Amino acid sequence: MPRTQRGDDARPAPGRRVTITDVARAAGVSIAVVSYSLNGRPGVSETTRRHVLKVAQDLDWRPSAAARSLRSTDTTSVGLQVLDGTGSVHSRSAGLDLAAGLRDVLGDVALALEVTADRETGSADLERAWSERRHTAFVVPDLLVDDPRVRVVGRVGARVVAVTPPDLGTAGAEHAVWFGGGADDAVGRYLVDLGHRRTVLLVADAGADVARALHAGLLTATAGLAATVSVLEASTAPAAGAVAARLFADEDPPTAVVTDGDVTALAVLEAARHRDLRVPWDVSVVSGADADTCRLVDPQLTAVARPWRGLAPAVAAALGVGPEGSVDPPAARLVIRGTTAPPPPGVGT
């Protein structure tokens, strides 16, 4: 039988509604066990169920109004979870754009944008949100095959839509949505066609969707060639600048640097300037995300334009909201500007 943690510290502050998190803490069990016990679901022993119900009664727990309203299998509330722990400005802006698009297409379905520090915290947040019946469906970007959120995805019973390249693995999520157009593969082909054979992918989080898609595209394009593709992580713009400075000081520097977002790309441009390197003639730079800043620098940044807001109808269709049937996702596209050119003669070939 679980150990009960009674005492003043187990009770919420006076006036605050008791949640199942409070019940779990007082009963000495997980939130999932409390949820199964309170909702009469299989998966816990009868002894544990009685123990949890007794603790809930002692704490005067009552289901929330939101929980009482979610009696059907219809999607009535969607939680969009965005990772923030990498410090990537690009990840946050993409999440905001997707949220804005979903707000326009979900109609009466409630939408909550929930920012979580990392995947482990996100796993606990997702399980808590489902156990407390705050949401009936979830949209989860950056879902890895070995992601701790996989455990939750596999057992919560809610509809989970992974916003991730489906060919890279969706970690058990039944539905996956990603851009069409093959822009990430186009980045690799374009650099190879220019003659680049030493490329660095500089990203905030190598496990994030954009980073994985770009890496896959670069590896596909360089397969069978005498070429190298290195992946380096830097979670902030200053860190990215420091990494780029070290790269450019190396005896055998890369001839092309691809980033996951515009802020990292700007840091690379600044590092190149400090080394008196000419972009694109000494080194080419590609941003994995397009933004106004890509057009405000000189030379303008070659970038991948990803219509995150336009992805919302396809995500809504995967959630089962709106017209029946699938919706084709919008295409991402490579926008060629002034930061890419062939490598210096005799270099990188």
Image (spheres, rainbow, N blue to C red):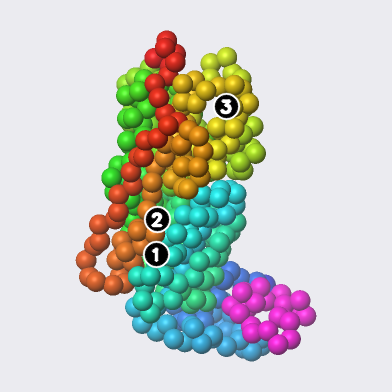
Q: Which mark is residue 36?
A: none
- Identify whether 47 is placed above or below 82: below
Q: Which mark is residue 101?
A: 1
Neighbour class for label 2 at 10 Å: few (<14), some, many (≥20)? many
Task: Report the front residue among 129 and 5.
Answer: 129
Of marks 3 and 2, the one in the foreground: 3
The residues bearing labels 1 and 2 have C-alpha atoms spaced at a distance of: 8 Å
Q: Quadrant of the N terminus?
A: bottom right
Disc 3: which residue: 272
The residues bearing labels 1 and 3 have C-alpha atoms spaced at a distance of: 36 Å
Q: Is residue 216 visible?
A: no
Neighbour class for label 3 at 10 Å: few (<14), some, many (≥20)? many
Q: Quadrant of the C terminus?
A: top left
Classify residue 73 by image quadrant. Answer: bottom left
Mark 1, secondary structure of its residue: helix
Disc 2: which residue: 308
Neighbour class for label 1 at 10 Å: few (<14), some, many (≥20)? many
The amino acid on which the numbered mark 2 sits, given as a three-letter code, is Trp
What residue appears at the point 56 percent right and 33 percent down from the top-left corner?
268
What residue appears at the point 63 percent right and 26 percent down from the top-left corner?
274
The residues bearing labels 3 and 2 have C-alpha atoms spaced at a distance of: 30 Å
Q: Is residue 320 left or right of 147 when viewed as pictured?
A: left
What residue appears at the point 29 percent right and 66 percent down from the top-left corner?
317
Q: Position of residue 305 (x, y in %)?
A: 38, 46
Marked residue nearer the N-terminal end (3 or 2) = 3
Which portion, as a residue range, is magenta?
5-26
The amino acid on which the numbered mark 3 sits, given as a three-letter code, is Ala
Classify residue 193 by image quadrant. Answer: top left
Instruction: Specify whether residue 346 is painted magenta.
Output: no
Q: Is residue 171 visible?
A: yes
Q: Position of residue 80 (x, y in %)?
A: 46, 64
Q: Position of residue 253 (x, y in %)?
A: 53, 20
